Image (spheres, grey):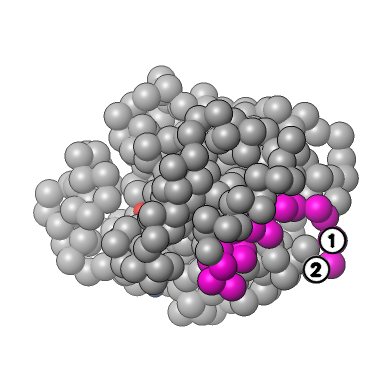
Amino acid sequence: MEQTAKVAVIGGGSWATANIKMLLDNRTDKEVFWWMRNEESISHLRQYGHNPNYLSSVEIRVPAENISNNLEEMLSQANMVLLNVPAAFLPDVLNKVPAGIFKGKKIISAIKGFVPEDHMIIGEFMNKKYDIPLEDIVVLSGPCHAEEVALEKLSYLTIASADPELATWFASLINTRYIKTNVSDDIYGTEYAAVLKNIYAVASGICNGLGYGDNFQSVLISNAIREIMRFVNAVHPIDRDIKESAYLGDLLVTAYSQFSRNRLFGNMIGKGYTVKSAQLEMNMVAEGFYASNSLHQINKIHKVNMPICRAVYAILYEKHSPHIEMRLLADQLS
Ligand SMILES: NC(=O)C1=CN([C@@H]2O[C@H](COP(=O)(O)OP(=O)(O)OC[C@H]3O[C@@H](n4cnc5c(N)ncnc54)[C@H](OP(=O)(O)O)[C@@H]3O)[C@@H](O)[C@H]2O)C=CC1
Ligand SMILES: O=C(CO)COP(=O)(O)O
């Protein structure tokens, strides 16, 4: 890994903006390219050096010519691609460029979601649809809200890859005073756990919206980590410690944080909003909504006992009453 990193960040939301900040604050020599779809945001960024709609206080020092909505142009100059579009929109975004453009590039996914059409995690999607070898794929995960990165609050990220040298290289590009990194080879477990925790954060929000208290939430989340453990052990059984921050830590931050979009979305559902009205009100993406359906489909194969995910699915997709579902769920928790 002797070459200079040329990283194309794909996505213009809050996590992409936070990732750009980490890459720029890190001192390793590199070049950064940034693709986003919104032309007005691009002009604003070029002129003022701030993303107007997400983490607008963060100073962005990317050269104007390296920010564009021409995906092919941004990708063709890079040797690393950092994917950061909500999973539901990823296939449409990538369909705009020839599939071969990814050949020979390292792919880093910072996305925590399933591709809805295929119910695949991103690493699997890039491997199956774009023929990217697993050794060229990296998962960027861990308990970390973009808003706290903007404030330079101390945060820990886990970089998972089947190739430990690649994971270590990527880690060396984002380490800063306020970002610490761990390296892991559990590429599947890290990604599945990061997607599942969004569903539990929705559950946590629903309970909060319904008026359940901290006593109940602690039981909900201790059951949630057991569900995550059962599921990742079923889909990818390796020796892992589920208490590590990429698994338990990410669940905790998302289920409890004031910044969690999934929790906020769940909270609105618990308070009586419809799914549509909660989504419109938020103006940000709650991956847990899409993940709930994909997990439901995937679990028809694995048949893991996941009563919390089942309850969230019933509320979001079968229009069951949150009040009744959570009462029924409460009888199954311990
Ligand atoms: N925010 C966080 O703290 C963290 C987020 N993540 C993950 O990062 C990923 C990206 O989320 P995040 O940056 O937070 O998202 P945000 O909610 O901040 O932003 C949403 C992004 O999605 C784009 N978008 C909306 N609709 C479409 C569409 N139809 N086609 C293409 N793009 C669209 C928006 O573009 P536009 O502005 O033009 O509408 C915007 O760039 C998610 O998988 C999330 O789970 C992971 C860790 C932390
Ligand atoms: O993944 C996250 C924190 O680690 C972000 O969670 P939310 O999308 O719920 O804000």
Image coords of residue 158 (percent x, y): 60, 34
Q: What residue do we see at 56% from left, 67% from top?
A: 320
Badge 2: how crowded within 10 Å, few (<14), some, or many (20+)? few
**Residue located beneath label 1 in the image:** 303
Q: Is residue 257 left or right of residue 112?
A: left
In what element is the residue under mark 1? loop
In magenta stretch: residue 305: yes
For the residues labelled 1 and 2, say whether their Cβ atoms are less than 8 Å apart.
Answer: yes
Q: Is residue 240 visible?
A: yes
Q: How far apart are marks 1 and 2 (CA)?
A: 5 Å
**Residue located beneath label 2 in the image:** 300
In magenta stretch: residue 298: no
Q: What residue do we see at 47% from left, 61% from top?
A: 86
Q: Is residue 82 visible?
A: no
Q: Please say if 125 is above or below 210.
A: below
Where are the magenta residues, as a range? 301-320
Q: Is residue 12 left or right of residue 269?
A: left
Considering the whole magenta stretch, tell me its main secondary structure: helix
Looking at this view, is 258 or 111 the one in front?
A: 258
